[in-house]
Image (tube, grey):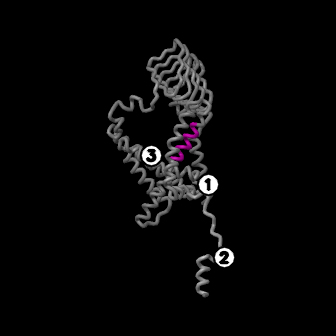
Amino acid sequence: MQKTKNILLLSFLTLLFMIGCTSSQSTQLNGDGTLVIGEVYTLESGKTLYGDVAVVGSSFNVEEGAVVNGDISLIGSTTEISGEVNGSIFAMGGSTTLSSSAVINGDINQMFHDLETIPGVSVSGDISTYSNPFSFPKLWNSLGAIFPYLADPEQVLLNRLVGSVIFCFIACLIIYLMPKSVQNCVNTIKNQPGTAWGVGLLVFLVIPLFVVILAITICLSPIALILLVAFMIAIVYGWIALAVIIGEKFSNWLYLKMSAVLKTFIGALLISIVVSLLSLIPCLGVPASMIAGCYGLGGVVISRFGKIEDKGNKKGNPPAVESDQPEPAAEARKSKKAK
């Protein structure tokens, strides 16, 4: 049984590594687009690239005579375009140089990004610079941006259902593969809930800031990607720990004897329902979910992803030493009786 668990754990971690930590390679996404991470990519003259292009922490060059038929998304990358782009460019961090022979048949939207245009470049769309990620006009062009469930309720319900199923599956899988690690995290949250929440809130505020700062640079942008993946895994792991706690409370409330996997499934299902309902409330759902999620995130950080169980007293109390000498009170009572 232990060997089977280890094999499943290795497979699961390998899958996460392949999905979230792919580096130093460019990948064709079934002909629909191209993903470039951590390398120097040059589209040579006379060649055409079809589909959207996503570039993360890389050097991306489009030579004169080369064509990109799709949008280009840039994160912390250095880009030089001398050819034609039949689409829009979205850039965050890094820098982009448009030479005099470049032709951009679309818009250029940038944030924390350095754009240099050489005289003679042709840009058919608008060049927009945003200092606030919430200032995009598309977020506020309709009532559906504020109340998304009013715009397409069926799609929202489907997204909530799919997300709930995925979260329940991951929670049950993790508690089955790593029960001791999850229990250490759960016990850490129970032992010091206040400290766990404070640490979780601090991490939730600081890590995204570090990710943005690292993404702006060129050399450290791959570290930003790795840090972001670790941060997202910690958040999910924290919610799984909270699911275990809620499942245990539910089991004890009904005086039921259930396995750890079943308790986790019930807790994850209840969390999914509550978070889904809260997310429908504008300006309240996200803060409420963040406040609750800080408990789990802090427990993950304090327990070092479940490696230890922090009981809130790191130094510990010195063990009581038995002494052969009688206590003063007892000695006084014996003297009184003797008299």
User: Real-space Cα distance between discs 3 and 2?
Assistant: 56 Å
In the rendered image, the residue lying farthest to the right is 324
Instruction: Residue 179: tell me if it is visible.
Output: no
Name the image quarter holding residue 334. bottom right
Q: Nearer the viewer, mark 3 or mark 1?
A: 3
Q: Are marks 3 and 1 in contact (CB under 8 Å)?
A: no
User: Real-space Cα distance between discs 2 and 1?
Assistant: 54 Å
Kind of residue at disc 2: Gln
Image position of 200 with respect to 333: above or below: above
Which quadrant of the figure contains the C terminus?
A: bottom right
Kind of residue at disc 1: Asn
Residue 325 or residue 46, whichever sits in front: 325
Q: Earlier in the sequence, mark 3 or mark 2?
A: 3
The residue that appears at 51% across and 14% down in the rendered structure is: 121
Q: Which residue has dot 3 on it?
A: 290
Say whether residue 107 is magenta.
Answer: no
**Of the numbered discs in the image, which one, if any, rests on residue 194?**
none
Regarding mark 2 in the picture, which secondary structure is present there? loop
Regarding mark 1 in the picture, which secondary structure is present there? helix
Kind of residue at disc 3: Met
The residue that appears at 32% across and 39% down in the rendered structure is: 150
Magenta region, residue range? 224-235
In the rendered image, the residue lying farthest to the bottom is 339
Instruction: Residue 292: tell me if it is visible.
Output: yes
Name the image quarter holding residue 253. bottom left
Q: Which residue has dot 2 on it?
A: 325
Exactly how many numbered labels are in the figure? Answer: 3
Q: Earlier in the sequence, mark 2 or mark 1?
A: 1
